[in-house]
Amino acid sequence: MDRRTLVGMLAAAGAAFPLVSRAAIAPTSPRTKNVVFLHGLFADGSCWSKVIARLQKKGVNCTSVQNPLTSLQEASEAARRAIAAQPGPTVLVGHSYSGMIVTEVGVDPKVTALVYVAARAPDAGEDYTALAKNYPTPPATGGIVFDEDWGRLSEQAFLQDFAGDLPRDEARVLYAVQQPFKKSLTTEQTTNAAWRSKPTFYAVSTQDRTINPDLERFMAKRMGAKTIEVAASHLALISHPDAIMNLILEALAV
């Protein structure tokens, strides 16, 4: 058989049994992993940096929203914009006050799970302030100072009651970047309770002096959340980032 005949036979065979491209037989890509982070009072979006760095090493796409701390409506709008910008299913994570935002906007169909870190978790239309009065007032409350309608924590309260388990130098930097909040923000109520329809996870800070730990336990239990307890101040996301990362990874796996 000459070379020309052999080439012809191979071409005919190729037509009858076409080669399958590498792309066509590649395994299906895993679901896109996206996390949107929301911060609370006395903080800004950088408070999630340690958790974000750990998740990014695992291939998770992270976005930390800069909460305007002016009203629940404006904070919710900022969160919704961030969720809309995600390329796929998204886990929503909130700390402290921003649990209100998680509860409000977490009903978005793109959101697959909710993670609360020492966070408020009210029911729809519930007066959170009235709920909190069922528990001893945490020490940080007495450290809030107002300049007209704008509040912030005093340095002493920040270092002792908000970030009590962080090295003093690190806590002082965080104090310097805290954002003021509008006083009316603390009296607003959610219209949704996303935790009633979404898988929910909660990290209780057992040494919290900003939200009473027993109030955190109550809210987590009421939600039926997968709950962990972290021996941390209100800032477990900074003092115990691995524990918070692992909880978020559980939420991503839902």
Image: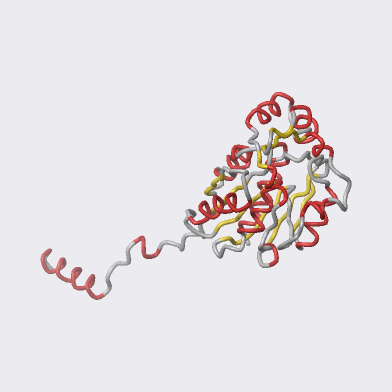
Which percent across, then down, holds residue 131?
A: 82, 55
Task: State the image quarter where residue 10 is shown.
Answer: bottom left
Left or right of residue 118, residue 73 in this image: left
Left or right of residue 165, residue 252 in this image: left
Q: Residue furthest bottom?
A: 16
Q: Is residue 7 above or below residue 34?
A: below
Instruction: Identify the residue at horizontal 74%, vertical 47% (top origin).
Output: 118
Q: Nearer the viewer, residue 70 or 212?
A: 70
Instruction: Identify the residue at horizontal 36%, vertical 65% (top origin).
Output: 24
Q: Residue furthest top?
A: 169
Q: Is residue 29 above or below residue 231?
A: below
Q: Is residue 87 above or below residue 183?
A: below
Left or right of residue 55, residue 228 in this image: right
Quadrant of image for the N terminus: bottom left
Q: How many marks?
A: 0
Instruction: Identify the residue at horizontal 58%, vertical 39% (top origin).
Output: 53
Which percent across, then down, holds residue 133?
A: 85, 51
Task: State the image quarter where residue 233 is shown.
Answer: top right
Which percent across, then down, holds residue 228?
A: 77, 51
Which percent across, then down, holds residue 96?
A: 71, 46
Quadrant of image for the C terminus: bottom right
Q: Is residue 78 above or below residue 31?
A: above
Instruction: Identify the residue at horizontal 70%, vertical 35% (top origin).
Output: 152
